[in-house]
Image: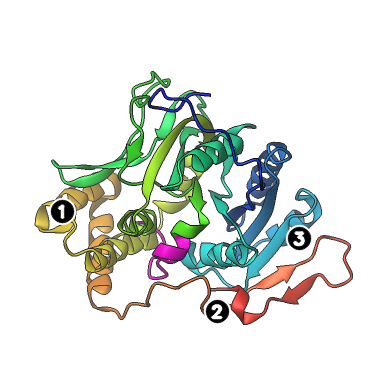
């Protein structure tokens, strides 16, 4: 197989199979979670993939459904309440690292993967030891020929981080791109040592900006972010848009996250002045009206003043408790996980 630059890839390490985990985070929508886990299992025999699902305080019976229908061997952790994307994922990332994970595939539960996606990402990671995040081409689930995200870049005017995407079927426009500035985290492979060096996900974000925050910290730790063109995943983007943007909390958390991001990275060029916020508010007005503008501003003010938690490390004591759920039919179906197994 050839690399994006046209040179032959190094063969995968044959002396020791990498310790590979997939961490899937979900809130409600059990049918999506089960589909995601089974798509991962379909490509796992060649890679030795371990499956871990983290339920983020679902309000429905998702945990019971997943316990009955997930692939054999799936580990299930449950947060008693929804703690947000970053803290939700951190419990799974910490658990996997404690099991000695060399690589962790992160996935939202509203995604699926092509049968060879994990193998493609793993081969690229083994060939390029300085790659901290390996990024697949993420396609629309509803239109699998169209690329929703192939990473992200900084745009000077109007100032913002924008995702690389195609308006129609993938035409190969990103095939010359290898190194990326940023990546969404809805489906990525992360090197374990990169997480250990950069820290886990920033717990101050509920959602929004947590992916670009981790991207910057991993790059600052000396690792690169690389696009793997042959790896394909699929995202149910429409459900995220439908479920999120209609809520006032969506816009409030959006503004709060922007403020927190600016506080963590004050020298970031797209956050050095008002043009970025002015652009965002103009877009918010178009997409959500004056209510969106007011709630974004309220959240932004909140994010500029609140006390922030430090970035957690994988080997630190836990903050958020989780419960390990046994497969359906086991004698003990809900067991507390020791505090050092959750963040």
Q: Residue at x 64, y 53 (%)?
A: 19
- Provide the major secondary structure of the magenta segment: loop
Q: Identify the element where label 2 is drawn.
A: loop
- Identify the residue under disc 3: 64
Find residue 273 and report its image quarter: bottom left
Q: Nearer the viewer, residue 111 or 10?
A: 10
- Identify the residue under disc 2: 318
Span shown in magenta: 195-208
Does 308 sit left or right of 290 as displayed? right
Q: Which mark is residue 285?
A: none
Q: Earlier in the sequence, mark 3 or mark 1?
A: 3
Q: CA distance from mark 2 to mark 3?
A: 25 Å
Q: What percent of the width, then of the height, locates residue 215?
A: 36, 53
- Above or below, comparing residue 226 to residue 78 in the picture: above
Q: Nearer the viewer, residue 44 or 276?
A: 44
Find residue 199 and report its image quarter: bottom left
Which class describes the residues within 10 Å of circle 2: few (<14), some (14-19), or many (20+)?
A: some
Which class describes the residues within 10 Å of circle 3: few (<14), some (14-19), or many (20+)?
A: some
- Identify the residue under disc 1: 269
Q: Is residue 146 visible?
A: yes
């Amino acid at each position: 197989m050839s690399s994006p630059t046209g040179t032959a890839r190094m063969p995968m390490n044959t002396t020791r199979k990498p310790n590979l985990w997939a961490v899937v985070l979900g809130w409600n929508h059990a049918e999506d979670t089960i589909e995601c886990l089974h798509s991962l299992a379909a490509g796992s025999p060649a890679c030795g993939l371990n499956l871990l699902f983290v339920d983020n305080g679902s309000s429905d019976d998702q945990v019971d459904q997943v316990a009955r229908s997930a692939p054999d061997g799936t580990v299930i952790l449950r947060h008693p309440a929804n703690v947000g994307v970053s803290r939700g994922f951190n419990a799974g990332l910490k658990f996997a690292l404690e099991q000695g994970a060399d690589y962790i595939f992160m996935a939202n539960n509203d995604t699926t993967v092509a049968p060879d996606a994990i193998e493609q990402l793993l081969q690229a990671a083994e060939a390029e030891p300085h790659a901290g995040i390996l990024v697949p081409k993420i396609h629309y689930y509803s239109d699998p020929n169209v690329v929703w995200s192939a990473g992200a870049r900084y745009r000077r005017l109007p100032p913002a981080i924008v995702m690389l995407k195609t308006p129609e079927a993938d035409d190969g426009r990103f095939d010359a791109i290898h190194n990326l500035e940023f990546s969404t985290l809805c489906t990525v492979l992360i090197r374990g040592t990169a997480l250990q060096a950069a820290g886990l996900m920033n717990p101050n974000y509920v959602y929004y900006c947590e992916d670009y925050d981790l991207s910057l910290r991993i790059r600052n730790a000396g690792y690169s972010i690389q696009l793997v063109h042959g790896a394909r995943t699929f995202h149910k983007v429409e459900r995220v848009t439908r479920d999120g943007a209609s809520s006032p909390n969506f816009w409030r958390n959006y503004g709060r996250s922007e403020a927190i991001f600016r506080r963590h990275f004050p020298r970031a060029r797209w956050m050095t002045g008002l043009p970025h916020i002015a652009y965002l508010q103009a877009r918010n007005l178009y997409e959500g009206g004056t209510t969106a503008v007011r709630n974004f501003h309220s959240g932004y003010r909140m994010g500029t003043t609140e006390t922030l938690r430090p970035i957690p490390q994988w080997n630190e004591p836990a903050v958020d408790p989780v419960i390990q759920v046994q497969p359906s039919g086991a004698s003990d179906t809900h067991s507390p996980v020791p505090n050092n197994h959750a963040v």
